[in-house]
Image (cartoon, rainbow, N blue to C red):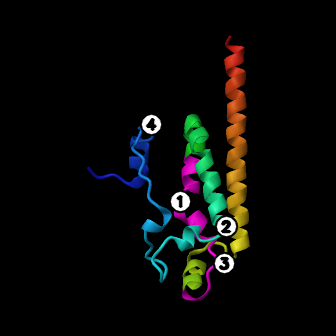
Amino acid sequence: MCANPSELAERFQNTDCPKVDFHGLSTSSWADAARDTFSWLGNHTQQLFFARIQDLEEPVKATGGELLRRWRHLTTSDQLYFMHEGVGADHTVHSYFSPYDGSIAEAVRVANDKIWDLEISVIQFQILKKQRRHLSC
């Protein structure tokens, strides 16, 4: 079967897939000299952002639709990668791929705006759902 990633995601959107817990340092990267996850989870800002994404997983999955699509976008590694604070050759690679001209502050600002907007949208969804349930009683 041939399918692109979006088609596969759609096909398995409502499927309970098994979870695999990989220790953060057991994976590797092609992009940096150390070939580890330091570029994604190596600083406090990245770790906090990743925790916020994880905390949103259950409530977002309960909403489905557009909010789930936006949450999945936040889970792409680039969101964390652009917050990397390295120096030298590794930083050069990060800057080359960054749409923020290598600005870590701008990457953090944009990511925070996205996750804040998603958090607010989930709360609004939950409120509307409660209101509709209350009206139908």
Count neighbours of disc 2 (C-alpha within 10 A) and say few if under 14, some if 14 to 19, many if 20 or more. few
Q: Residue at x 71, y 49 (%)?
A: 117
The residue beneath circle 4 is: 14
Tell which circle, 3 or 1, labels the residue nearer the N-terminal end: 1
The residue beneath circle 1 is: 76
Q: Residue at x 71, y 58 (%)?
A: 112
**Kind of residue indicated by mark 4:** Asn
Count neighbours of disc 1 (C-alpha within 10 A) and say few if under 14, some if 14 to 19, many if 20 or more. few
The residue beneath circle 3 is: 101
Question: How far, Cα to Cα, is label 4 from label 1?
Answer: 19 Å
The residue beneath circle 2 is: 44
Q: Residue at x 45, y 73 (%)?
A: 29
Q: Is residue 137 magenta?
A: no
Decide which of 6, 86 is in the foreground and name it. Answer: 86
Asked if residue 131 is positioned above or below residue 85 in the image, the reply reads: above
Asked if residue 31 is positioned above or below residue 72 in the image, the reply reads: below
**Kind of residue indicated by mark 2:** His
Mark 3–mark 4 contact, CB under 8 Å?
no
Asked if residue 98 is positioned above or below residue 20 in the image, the reply reads: below
**Viewed as shown, does residue 134 lie left or right of 34?**
right
Tell which circle, 3 or 4, labels the residue nearer the N-terminal end: 4
Count neighbours of disc 4 (C-alpha within 10 A) and say few if under 14, some if 14 to 19, many if 20 or more. few
Q: Which callout, 2 or 3, points to the residue nearer the camera?
A: 2
Q: Which callout, 2 or 4, points to the residue nearer the camera?
A: 2
